[in-house]
Image (spheres, rainbow, N blue to C red):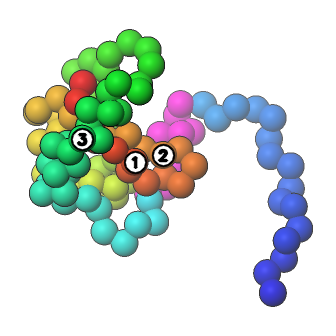
């Protein structure tokens, strides 16, 4: 049976942006393909995620950053990253399980 002991205490220093960017690739078996990316972008979830997202709109440079970030970690294919960046869509990555939880329109 696996041990249920508590892990060692985590550092109290918050992770920096550079540390977050340097996180290892996702453990998913295959990245989201272009067809899957477009299907998610066209779904009702793309509308809902924009309505639920607080704060300032995502600009063009952030769209490119988010697509490249997901691509570099194996979450989406290069074709999906290029399409998303060209068409103003970006993946929303769940920070706890490191998977794509949606595709939003900027």
Q: Name the residue under label 3.
A: 44
Which range of residues does the magenta coloring cover? 17-25
Q: Which residue lies furthest to the top in this view?
A: 56
Q: Which of the two discs, 1 and 3, sits closer to the camera?
A: 3
Q: Earlier in the sequence, mark 2 or mark 3?
A: 3
Instruction: Please tell me which residue is depicted at 20% across the width and 45% down the height of the picture.
Output: 43
Q: Can residue 67 be seen in this view?
A: no
Which mark lies nearer to you, 2 or 3?
3
Q: Is residue 23 magenta?
A: yes
Q: Are marks 1 and 2 in contact (CB under 8 Å)?
A: yes
Per the image, label 2 sits on a secondary structure element best described as loop
Secondary structure under the numbered disc 3 in the rendered image: helix
Q: Circle 2: is it few (<14), some (14-19), or many (20+) Cα within 10 Å?
A: few
State how far apart marks 2 and 3 are (Cα): 18 Å
Q: Mark 1: give few (<14), some (14-19) or many (20+) Cα within 10 Å.
A: some
- The residue positioned 44% from the left and 59% from the top of the image is 26
Where's the N terminus, which quadrant? bottom right
On the image, the x and y values in percent for residue 17 come to: 53, 30
The x and y percentages for residue 100 are 38, 50
- Helix, strand or loop for disc 1: strand
């Amino acid at each position: 049976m696996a041990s249920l002991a508590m892990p060692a205490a985590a550092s109290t220093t918050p992770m920096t942006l550079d540390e977050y960017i340097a996180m290892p690739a996702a453990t998913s078996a295959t990245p989201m393909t272009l067809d899957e990316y477009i299907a998610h972008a066209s779904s009702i979830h793309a509308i809902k995620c924009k309505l639920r997202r607080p704060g300032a709109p995502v600009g063009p440079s952030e769209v490119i950053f988010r697509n490249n970030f997901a691509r570099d970690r194996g979450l989406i294919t290069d074709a999906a990253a290029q399409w998303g960046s060209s068409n103003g869509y970006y993946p929303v990555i769940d920070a706890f399980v490191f998977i794509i939880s949606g595709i939003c329109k900027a």
